[in-house]
Image (tube, grey):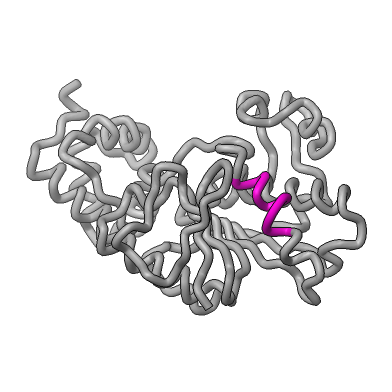
């Protein structure tokens, strides 16, 4: 359709804008993604063509539109207990190491999307405590951050439809950790919700005010960044972790050539990275 056409120079300008705003690098072949993600914004902002929408986005005065565009481009689908092994490692390796800690275990989900990852972490903590009474006496504090305010609102509501609930969630966990909230929706139960808080954060910004963590999850995020930005983010993660703290990356992501602040630990299955002392 003509109203969704973008010239190459317009696409290039948009790619530069997106990388500057949130670090995401769009390849030469991602024009289809821009069209599909931004087309719904045309009616919302009263713009007739995608070209005009991109042009307005480049204006620093269009703050609401710019925020909506970044929101649309950074929203990713996710699922419960994605890849399984990180959540099993929490219960079999990491939580036992922290079981006698005299403070809460602090975990950061660094790209929480619609909330499945941080709530899966909370459910894993609950399952571990049920099987190991008296451990983690000070509890577990989980913080989820995301650049998308729309996603953060979903996280805080902790309410999901049948399609979202079907993705990676067993019937047993569905029954134990959710309560029906009407209209085919279900909400995470209060004890799990209370373990998790959420805040807006751009991974390109400073993490200094976040405090120190024992575990950081940043999975399937670094693949969108340039090597220089990846190295910067991992360096900041190292600073945000306590000594011997753990970092989870995505199954297809590697730290090779990006940092010497971590030891790689091969597990069966999966790999985790431990901060050097």
Residue positioned most to the top: 1
Q: Which residue sits at x=47%, y=68%?
A: 237
Quadrant for residue 23, please give it: bottom left
177 over 141 or under it: above or below: above
Which secondary structure dominates the residues rendered in magenta? Answer: helix
Q: What's the magenta region?
A: 86-95
Instruction: Specify whether residue 94 is painted magenta.
Output: yes
Tell me if 198 is positioned left or right of 99 in this view: left
Q: Position of residue 35 (x, y in %)?
A: 27, 32
Q: Is residue 154 visible?
A: no
The residue under the point 55% across, 72% down is 241
Image coords of residue 117 (percent x, y): 60, 46
Please check the rendered image and state whether residue 68 is part of the magenta-colored stretch, yes or no. no
* Residue 105 image-quadrant placement: bottom right
Kindly identify the residue that appears in the image at 77 percent across and 25 percent down.
171
97 vs 14, left or right, is: right
Q: Indicate the position of residue 36 as horizontal and vertical percent values.
A: 32, 30
Say whether residue 186 is visible.
Answer: yes
Image location of residue 16, percent across then percent down: 19, 54
Q: Would residue 120 appear left or right of 225 to someone viewing this image?
A: right
Q: Is residue 135 left or right of residue 187?
A: right
Q: Give the residue displayed 47% in from the left and 52% down from the top.
A: 249
């Amino acid at each position: 359709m003509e109203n969704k056409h973008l010239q190459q120079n317009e696409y290039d300008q948009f790619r530069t804008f997106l990388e500057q705003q949130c670090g995401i690098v769009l390849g030469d072949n991602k024009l289809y993604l821009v069209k599909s993600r931004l087309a719904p914004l045309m009616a919302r902002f009263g713009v007739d063509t995608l070209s005009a929408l991109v042009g307005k986005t480049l204006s620093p005065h269009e703050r609401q539109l710019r925020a909506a565009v970044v929101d649309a481009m950074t929203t990713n689908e996710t699922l419960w207990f994605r890849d399984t092994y990180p959540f099993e490692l929490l219960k079999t390796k990491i939580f036992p190491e922290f079981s006698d800690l005299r403070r809460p275990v602090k975990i950061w989900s660094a790209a929480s999307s619609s909330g499945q990852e941080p709530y899966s972490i909370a459910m894993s903590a609950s399952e571990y405590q049920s099987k190991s009474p008296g451990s983690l006496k000070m509890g577990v504090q989980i913080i989820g951050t995301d650049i998308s305010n729309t996603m953060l609102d979903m996280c805080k509501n902790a309410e999901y439809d049948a399609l979202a609930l079907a993705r990676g969630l067993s019937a047993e966990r569905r029954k134990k950790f959710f309560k029906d909230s009407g209209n085919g929706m279900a909400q995470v139960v209060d004890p799990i919700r209370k373990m998790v808080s959420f805040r807006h954060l751009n991974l390109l910004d400073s993490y200094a005010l976040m405090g120190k963590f024992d575990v950081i999850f940043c999975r399937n995020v670094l693949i969108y960044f340039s090597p220089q930005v990846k190295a910067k983010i991992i360096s900041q993660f190292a600073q945000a972790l306590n000594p011997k703290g753990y970092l989870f990356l995505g199954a297809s992501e590697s730290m090779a050539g990006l940092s010497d602040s971590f030891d790689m630990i091969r597990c069966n299955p999966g790999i985790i990275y431990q901060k050097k002392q």
